[in-house]
Amino acid sequence: MRVLKEATFEEVLSCHDRENLGSASFVYTADQLRTADKEVGGRWTLATLSREDTLNIMLPTHRHPAENPDELIPKPGLTVSVAAGRVRELTRETGLCWENIHFHKALDFSQNYVFLKFENGGLKHLDDLHRLLAWAVFDKKEEVLAYVAGVIQ
């Protein structure tokens, strides 16, 4: 992880709002960011993540039970790398989860952000799970821009 600068929570929330307005999980993820902000005492960093950093982000439990009873990401979670290795088989490249991942296929990851928390010596996902999976599934090469709660230069 290469730190670019310290960031304010207002900057983080403004970026989240710009990039996620209209998302079905908009309110939920904004609340996740607010909770993380309180837990880290307002300490945020804007950073670029290497391929290794990105592949090792810990993802939360995730599934779309109406489409597939199997959890794409079972408890207690998987890294981006492991989850990306299962996504095509579990989604069969159909359904809402796959559509969300495929939507990000053409995204320029060097111009968009993900939201993470530094916890227990590693990076934990706060928002943009489908974007991270798309980055790995479609073998993107760009470094990922991330707002990280709990890391200061």
Image: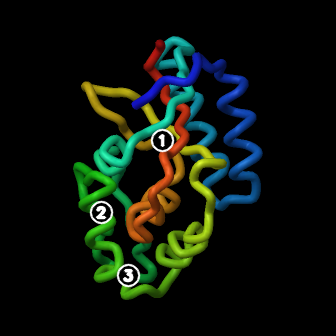
Residue name at image x 68 percent, y 59 percent: 23
Image quarter in which the N terminus is found: top left
Q: Residue furthest front?
A: 141
Cα separation between marks 1 and 3: 22 Å
To which residue does mark 1 refer? 126
Q: Earlier in the sequence, mark 1 or mark 2?
A: 2
Residue name at image x 48 percent, y 41 percent: 126
> Tags 1 and 2 in contact by the CB under 8 Å rule?
no
Label 3 secondary element: helix
Which quarter of the picture shows residue 84?
A: bottom left
Q: Horizontal placement of 21 versus 50: left or right? A: right
Amino acid bearing label 1: Leu
Residue name at image x 59 percent, y 29 percent: 34
Q: Horizontal placement of 70 versus 14: left or right? A: left
Disc number lying in front (1 or 2)? 2
Q: Please tell me whether residue 124 is drawn above or below residue 142 in the rendered image.
A: above
**Which of the two residues, 85 or 47, is positioned nearer the viewer here?**
47
To which residue does mark 3 refer? 91
Q: Which mark is residue 83?
A: 2
Q: Please tell me whether residue 46 is drawn above or below residue 88 in the rendered image.
A: above
Q: Please tell me whether residue 78 is drawn above or below residue 72 in the rendered image.
A: above
- The location of residue 75, given as percent across then percent down, is 24, 54
Label 2 secondary element: helix
Cα separation between marks 3 and 2: 12 Å
Q: Horizontal placement of 27 versus 153: left or right? A: right
Q: Which mark is residue 10?
A: none
